[in-house]
């Protein structure tokens, strides 16, 4: 039993589920307490111990089914001894070939044979590496063919293995035996093929905020940000100024809460002098609530540009409500613009940050490269107190979105909030990759006009 | 393979298998799914904390109350929020009491240092008496310390742990693995009894791996139709059978809409109570429209549901 358990734990780890030895020990203890013959309880015990968040449950179920329930293998399957015989033949053949010419050795072939022998660990490990493989940094001619070409070669190997098995079975067995054996192997290889083509996603119970009110053209604050004329942009500044003042007032009340935290001994003793040394007037150390630090990454291409403009204005106008604000803009390259805001007045800084001299806006948007660049140079800016705000439509020109980098970023920060100017119904259209990023965000909001943006900033500050 | 568990305290309620937990929770007015009762059973049997995740209003806090009721234990609840520190959660020195005592025993201090020749000797003597002022007498235990020092075992509910700061999460680690607390001036306080710990989280932020590793995980989702029906029948025995069926169907369909906040179990119960008060025998578009604001808490959600009224009634 323990062997099966550790084997399963290894498979879970290969699929990026963090299962520690302590959890395997706990699971073993727990299995001793329940009815092992009950498949539901068995699954529940393993799930309660190996999966520690809702997001990983889909992954766990997938591996569990793969490991324990050999789905698709029904009663008229070939007996185990015959399948083992064929697998042994294949294994032997592979070994001989490797001994003759070690340069031709392909670990994937061995992984497939192991998979047929009910040991999926090797294959799962390799496939997971392939699914999460990153595109090398590309500059001019971008492609996302790396993963696809790898998948294709594995699929061809599976096909070749299938025909080799058919030949072997025909040579060794005849009649009904041969047919059921072929069926068993076809089923197993189909499952391997399924693993190659489809990786289970995460269930993410994130807070999804739809656009509360539909944008209209009547009021300047309800007009879609992308449709604003230069005149309206300047009108907007007055609206924003009013909002900033209001929010500052509310925030200052919040930060001025007194009588919290530990007693200030020095001041209490000093005050006690007035009452002949009796400490009647107790002074507390004033402990304001923690201010969050913000990292904002804004897509400044095309339609998202105006949203980025207003969000940066709001964040920097309210900078005293945050511990620190770091901001980045990107199209294909990622550029840090925090320094501009530190040295220039807000409006000048925004013009400079969005100007052609800071960032080349003629290149196609590439979220994958942006995330890669951020991870290389700025991962240290994220910590458990940072809220990461990404403003963008997630349209990545069919280039690899590399959403697994966002998953790594999630582990380093407190929250990830994604703001998109598009309505949820267009998230699955064209080159929009929001659905891939969504799995790793804590919150995703549609921000189409100034009202939506103001609602968001209000929640962030107060 | 049901092993009989040894009672940890004489007279304490002890469950020997999952079914007993299920029945025990039912007696405490909590209809538990198989998953919930299995996890609770395992946690009770091995003294592991349970980390409960799930959307708001599916009965996470209620489960802790039901566990306390069926085990006949006291429930100690710690509500977490941003800025919660160890002074609020673990223990606090009673400074005011310490100061008052200092004033009152001033004369006694004078006798201690009366025949001291130098200042340093006087300070030495006062320092040797320091323990008198940093003793348990001046400690005010907060929920976490209360839970492990209680002579009777308790159920400790740490509610909405995701709202607390990462620093506070670090404090919890020692408590959750060894059920002990270290107070720098006094030393490590060992547990008198081991509490059953339940932590709830709304997934506002991710908990650290270290915390998750120490717990058994339980995800409670919105209940299935059958379970919700059982809950409604148990809480409102007088409800008309046909109305209950219609109500549960309608709630399930409302949850499928694209809402800002989906209705939870307590809202289903409130709705049922409202319909019973109105003497409604069946759901009609009018009764639903009139009572929709009990189920949905946002204007936009109510508007959306009104538009889909025919789908909701089915």
Image: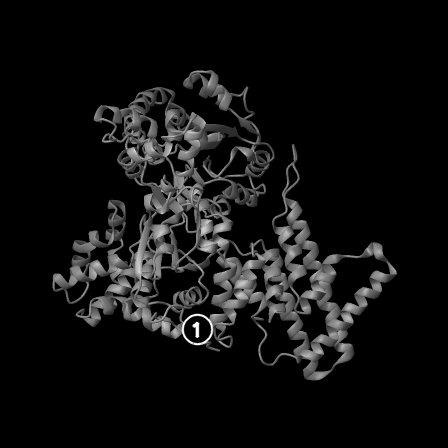
Q: Nearer the viewer, residue B29 or A56?
A: B29
What color scheme is it? one colour
Q: Label 1 neighbourhood size at 10 Å, few (<14), some (14-19), many (20+)?
A: few
Q: Nearer the viewer, residue B133 or A119?
A: B133
Residue A210 relative to residue A335: left or right: left
Say which quarter of the image contains residue B244.
bottom left
Q: Position of residue B135 (x, y in %)?
A: 37, 44
Residue B270's place in the image compared with A385, above or below, is: below
Q: Is residue A335 visible?
A: yes
Extreme bottom residue here? A175
Residue B298 relative to residue A41: left or right: left
Q: Nearer the viewer, residue B289 or B6?
A: B6
Q: Position of residue A423 (x, y in %)?
A: 39, 42
The residue marked by circle 1 belongs to what chain?
A: B
Residue shown at 41% from the left, 18% from the top: A347
Residue B250's place in the image compared with B188, above or below, is: below
Q: Is residue A431 visible?
A: no
Residue A265 relative to residue A52: left or right: left
Q: Position of residue A140 (x, y in %)?
A: 65, 32
Q: How many marks?
A: 1
Q: Position of residue B99 (x, y in %)?
A: 30, 35
Extreme front residue here? B115
Extreme right residue here? A100
Residue identified by numbered label 1? B5
For the residue labelled by badge 1, is the local secondary structure a helix, a strand or a loop?
A: loop
């Amino acid at each position: 039993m323990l062997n099966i358990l550790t084997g399963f734990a290894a498979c879970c780890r290969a699929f990026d589920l963090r299962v520690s030895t302590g959890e395997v020990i706990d699971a073993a203890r727990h299995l001793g307490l329940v009815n092992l013959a009950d498949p539901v309880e068995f699954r529940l015990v393993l799930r309660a111990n190996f999966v520690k968040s809702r997001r990983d449950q889909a992954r766990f179920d997938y591996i569990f089914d793969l490991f324990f329930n050999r789905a698709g293998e029904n009663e008229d399957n070939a007996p185990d001894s015959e399948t083992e015989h064929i697998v042994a033949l294949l294994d032997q053949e592979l070994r001989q070939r490797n001994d003759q010419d070690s340069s031709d050795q392909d670990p994937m072939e061995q992984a497939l044979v192991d998979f047929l022998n009910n040991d999926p660990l090797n294959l799962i490990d390799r496939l997971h590496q392939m699914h999460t493989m990153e595109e090398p940094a590309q500059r001019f001619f971008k492609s996302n063919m790396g993963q696809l070409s790898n998948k294709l070669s594995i699929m061809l190997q599976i096909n070749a293995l299938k025909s080799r098995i058919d030949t072997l079975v025909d040579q060794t067995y005849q009649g009904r035996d041969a047919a059921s054996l072929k069926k068993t192997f076809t089923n197993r290889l189909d499952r391997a093929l399924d693993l190659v083509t489809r990786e289970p996603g995460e269930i993410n119970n994130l807070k999804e905020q739809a656009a509360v009110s539909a944008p209209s053209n009547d009021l300047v604050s309800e007009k879609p940000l992308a449709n604003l004329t230069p005149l309206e942009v300047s009108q907007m500044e007055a609206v924003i100024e009013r909002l900033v003042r209001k929010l500052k007032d509310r925030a200052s009340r919040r930060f001025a809460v007194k009588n919290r935290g530990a007693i200030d001994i020095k001041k209490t003793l000093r005050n006690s002098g007035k009452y002949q040394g009796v400490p009647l007037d107790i002074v507390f150390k004033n402990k304001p609530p923690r201010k969050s630090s913000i990292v904002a990454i804004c897509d400044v291409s095309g339609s998202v540009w105006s949203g980025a403009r207003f969000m940066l204005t709001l964040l920097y106008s309210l900078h005293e409500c945050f511990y620190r604000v770091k901001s980045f803009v990107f199209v294909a390259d990622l550029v840090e613009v925090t320094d501009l805001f530190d040295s220039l007045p807000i409006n000048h800084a925004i013009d400079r940050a969005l100007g052609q001299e800071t960032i080349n806006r003629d290149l196609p948007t590439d979220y994958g490269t942006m995330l890669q660049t951020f991870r290389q140079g700025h991962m240290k800016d994220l910590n458990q107190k940072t809220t990461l705000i990404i403003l963008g439509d997630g349209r990545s020109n069919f280039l690899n979105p590399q959403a697994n980098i966002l998953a790594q970023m999630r582990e380093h920060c407190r929250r990830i909030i994604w703001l998109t100017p598009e309505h949820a119904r267009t998230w699955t259209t064209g080159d929009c990759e929001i659905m891939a990023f969504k799995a790793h965000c804590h919150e995703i909001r549609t921000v189409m006009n100034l009202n939506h943006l103001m609602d968001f900033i209000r929640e962030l500050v107060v | 393979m049901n092993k009989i568990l040894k009672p940890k305290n004489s007279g304490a309620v002890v469950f020997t298998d999952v079914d007993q937990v299920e029945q025990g929770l039912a007696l405490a007015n909590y209809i538990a799914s198989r998953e919930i009762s299995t996890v609770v059973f395992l946690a009770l049997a091995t003294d592991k904390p349970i980390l409960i995740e799930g959307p708001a209003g599916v009965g996470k806090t209620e489960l802790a109350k039901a566990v306390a009721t069926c085990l006949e234990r006291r429930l100690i609840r710690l509500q977490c929020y941003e800025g919660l520190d160890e002074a609020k959660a673990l223990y606090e020195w009673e400074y005011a009491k310490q100061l008052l005592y200092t004033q009152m025993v001033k004369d006694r201090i004078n006798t201690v240092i009366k025949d001291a020749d130098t200042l340093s000797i006087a300070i030495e003597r006062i320092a040797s008496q320091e323990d008198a002022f940093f003793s348990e007498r001046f400690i005010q235990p907060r929920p976490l310390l209360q839970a492990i020092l209680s002579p009777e075992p308790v159920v400790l509910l740490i509610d909405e742990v995701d709202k607390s700061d990462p620093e506070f999460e670090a404090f919890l680690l020692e408590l959750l693995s060894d059920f002990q607390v270290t107070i720098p001036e006094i030393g490590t306080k060992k547990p008198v009894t081991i509490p059953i710990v339940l932590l709830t989280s709304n997934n506002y932020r991710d908990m650290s791996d270290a915390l998750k590793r120490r717990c058994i995980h339980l995800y409670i989702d919105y209940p299935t139709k059958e379970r919700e029906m059982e809950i409604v029948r148990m809480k409102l025995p007088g409800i008309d059978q046909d109305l209950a069926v219609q109500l549960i169907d309608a709630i399930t369909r409302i949850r499928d809409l694209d809402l800002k906040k989906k209705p939870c179990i307590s809202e289903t119960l409130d709705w049922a109570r409202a319909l019973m008060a109105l003497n409604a025998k069946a759901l009609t578009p009018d009764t639903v429209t009139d009572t929709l604001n009990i189920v949905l808490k946002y204007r936009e959600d109510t508007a959306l549901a009104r538009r889909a009224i025919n789908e909701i009634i089915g």
